[in-house]
Amino acid sequence: MVSQNSWRFGGKAWQRLALWAVAPVLVMLGVPVTWAAAQPAAAAAANAPARPTRPFNFEDVVELARQLAAEPPRPRGAVTPGLEQLTYDQYRDIRFRIDEALWTKDRVPFRIDLLPAGFVYTAPVSVSIVEDGVVRTQLSNPAMFDLGPSVPKALHDKSLSLSGFRVRTQLNSREYWDEFLVFQGASYFRAVGRGQNYGLSARGVALGTADPAGEEFPAFTQFWIEKPAARATSLVIHALLESPSLTGAYRFTVQPGQDTQMDVQYTLFPRKELRNVGIAPLTSMFLFDGTNRQRFDDFRYRVHDSDGLLFVGQNGEQVWRQLANPRNLQLATFTAERPRAFGLMQRARMLADFQDLEANYERRPSAWVEFGESTPPLGPLRLVEIPSTSETNDNIVAFWQPRDALPAGKPFSGSYRLHWTAESLVQLPLARFVAARSGTNFEGNRRLIALDLTGAGTSPDGLELEVIASNGKVFHPVIQTNPTIRGLRASFEFDPGGAQLIEFRAVVRRDGAPVSETWLFRWTPA
């Protein structure tokens, strides 16, 4: 897998490559305003931002991105010396002091914790607060962090560079401020809803994913967080995106709750023509489930942050693509038109599904993307599955790709709504496939696939399982009652006939009409 903190050009990779410096002085709205990733407190006071002629807004970020796109890429910045050499354990030994969180003493529903640079996070970022239209950069100071004994002594009295931030709110109770959102590393961000643990991630944009020439990882280099009102239910975050190939402006409106909702507005400015661009990219981990468990000597039944790609086509078809951990890199393309919605989903929701008392995969969120009408209608949904032997690797990527290349110098804008949710909160009309298993049949002469289905009742009467395979032969499609899930089990056998890849498509019908979503799976020999 390619690390989120790697850059790859011409097939060569450099690990932990810092990205870009934040320019010390920008002229915005005709007023000098200082935004720096890190600077001495005395310099900050001397360069305190003047009140602009009008309040800061998203169009200011758009204009900044537009100006930067017309210039050569800015050189990367350096973090506080020594941070880039930290090991994982040393980095974990730096802890933000909760009493230093922004807005701790204010009557607002959110608190901001600043995150230090270090380990693989070697690109400094700037974090600013917007209050009453005025931008104020948040500067690090030694009092913000507790440094444990494993951290080199030379760092203990330093103002540490920042790599991002996390946001807390009273999500699960009035007695505790839960972390529910984090922006850190390239353009990655994660969120959770009520009762959930972190799992899959989203990104601002994907460039060249699975391209033989290598992937480019743009990064958020500056953030502007609007201070909310006392009774606000959402938080607004602006971000500047930079990479050698493009710049971009983003606006996130985040509303935490049972289903944490993010409205994302973006404008991209390509420096050159871009063909392999991923919009609303989601990144997750799939190691094994019942379809490939025989490859792993593991006491657990499943290990994954997501078990399927769900999407709704423009024609209304509801499709569930079972995820795979292949032996070789796999690319899959769905739909010629932009889907109405798509997501990487976690359908297994019981501890018994995983039997992992520490990772609690059953509490990982699903991420569901709904596109705004302003998004262009043409272009495929793409899925990348990368071989992996470890659950620490994010090996699944899904995104929508515009059909036409993005021309140099021309802005590309759009919006979408992103839900961090339990899959059950995504309300779709057809019955759902909630589990898949694969093995040999009783005679040992064919393969068998068993699919568990909920939402179609418990009686198989009048139902038919339709299975189409791109290779081999399919035998004995059967539907029967499955009392353990208060639903159904659909199963079929197949003979690969020497095929090294089979694309399966299955749907349960009644009188010719679909009762279930369409199940897709790419089979390859174990």
Image: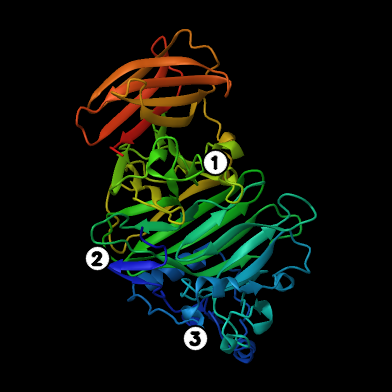
Q: Residue at x 48, y 31 (%)?
A: 435
From mark 1 to mark 2, how far is it between C-alphas? 37 Å
Label 3 SS = loop
Query: Quadrant location of the C terminus?
Result: top left
Residue type, numbered disc 2: Gly
Residue labelled with disc 3: 81
Number of other residues with Cα within 10 Å of mark 1, as a class: few under 14, some 14 to 19, many 20 or more = many
- Outermost left residue: 498
Identify whether 65 is placed above or below 49: above
Residue type, numbered disc 3: Pro
From mark 3 to mark 2, how far is it between C-alphas? 29 Å
Is residue 369 among what the camera can see?
no
Give residue 11's mark: 2
Q: Earlier in the sequence, mark 1 or mark 2?
A: 2
- Whether the residues at callouts 3 and 1 have beta carbons within 8 Å, the answer is no
Image coordinates for residue 447, horizontal then vertical, percent: 32, 26
Q: Nearer the viewer, residue 242 or 430?
A: 430
Number of other residues with Cα within 10 Å of mark 2, as a class: few under 14, some 14 to 19, many 20 or more = few
Residue type, numbered disc 1: Phe
Give residue 354's mark: 1
Image coordinates for residue 498, horizontal then vertical, percent: 19, 31
Q: Report which quarter residue 110 is drawn in.
A: bottom right
Image coordinates for residue 273, horizontal then vertical, percent: 26, 60
Between marks 1 and 2 in the image, the one whose residue lies nearer the viewer: 1
From mark 3 to mark 1, how far is it between C-alphas? 42 Å
Q: Earlier in the sequence, mark 3 or mark 1?
A: 3
Is residue 197 among what the camera can see?
yes
Q: Report which quarter residue 348 is drawn in.
A: top right
Image coordinates for residue 279, horizontal then vertical, percent: 40, 51
